[in-house]
Image (cartoon, rainbow, N blue to C red):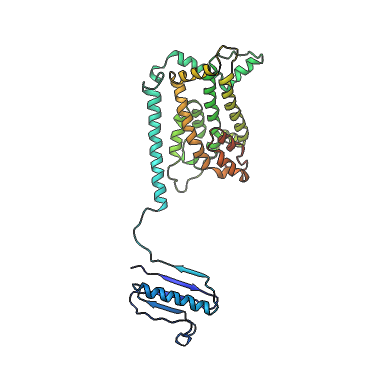
Amino acid sequence: MLSGKLTLCSMRSPSVVKFSPQKPLKIFTFRNRGLHPPGRPRIFAFNADDRKKRHNVLLSATIDARRLGTRRELISITPKATRGGGNSVSELDDNVRKLLQAILWIAEGVYIIWLFLLPYAPGDPVWAISSETINSLIGLSLNFFFILPLLNSVGIHLIEAPVLHPMSEGLFNFVIAWTFMFAPLLYTDKMRDRYKGSLDVLWGFQMFLTNTFLIPYMAIRLNEAGGGYTPKKTSELGSIMTKGAPIVGLIGGLACLLSVLWALYGRGDGNFGDLPERWEFLLGYLGSERLAYAFIWDICLYIIFQPWLIGENLQNIQKDKVAVVNFLRFVPVVGLVAYCLCLNAEIET
């Protein structure tokens, strides 16, 4: 049976109401001062099953308190604790954590098997890759961030840039530039110490194989925090990427913007067609090349991982910029640029 206590606190004398299923109804009001021993609280005790009597007693106590010029300041009802019930918040969080980990590991398996091994996706799997695809990949790598094409365009021809379709160059550099900006975010991630490997190696391989290495990191960082662990010392590369985060953000952001412009208007004298023709090439490129098809997967996963990681590391942002970064983190690329530009320079890494 539910038992409870109602306390009426006034400026002069407190009144306490106790519900008891055993004792008969006894009423002491403020008027019956002769029945109330001095120095003790006034008590109303009655059978808890009698709702009508309980209501009358509470109403009488309220009226008497008002007539005496007192003011009711607090009403507190303390129900008796019940046993059983649902899971605690920590247990629910733990279940969500395990579920997310399972989803991420499954995603990693699907990513590798579907994009690298099975022959059903567009293009060639790794074990049957063609020489044409290899040559295209080498050419795209040489045109990294459009350095060679831009040097050639101003008359510097130390190395001739491979001539590829600007749509393929734009897509490649867009994904690589976005990956480049993940470095400051990874090195300042509050849960990075749960990953026992080298972040330098992780980010280095991510630059080449993107989500092949980022998905496992996202799963491992959800491991339970071990008690008494010592945070790892930040590497020299990590310090450079963290302290130079604004520069990383500017370079990556400009490279992404240039990638889009290059895809639409680059190599205008190379007979690559107008916008409709370039769009038609892009659709055919995505449907025939495994590398291009994989980049679409990478973009979709980055759209998920970027706001996830930034949202859990807003404490690293300058205090007056937190609201802006929290809003922009959902905008692809832009949110990561904002994180790099607004990263607190005094953060401990």
Q: Quadrant of residue 24?
A: bottom left
Tell me the residue at 63%/13% (across/down).
158
Q: Residue 258: percent from the left, percent from the top?
A: 59, 24
Asked whether, in this view, residue 57 is left or right of residue 255, the answer is left
Tell me the residue at 40%/33% (across/down).
107
Q: Residue 349: percent from the left, percent from the top?
A: 56, 41
Tell me the residue at 46%/72% (across/down).
7
Query: Does residue 53 appear in the picture of this structure?
Result: yes
Tell me the residue at 40%/18% (across/down).
124
Q: Nearer the viewer, residue 103 or 224?
A: 103
* Residue at the far bottom in the pictured view: 34
Q: Quadrant of the N terminus?
A: bottom left
* Residue at the far right in the pictured view: 154
Q: Is residue 256 above or below residue 160?
A: below
Q: Residue 186: percent from the left, percent from the top?
A: 52, 36
Q: Is residue 260 above or below residue 314?
A: above
Q: Is residue 118 above or below residue 54?
A: above
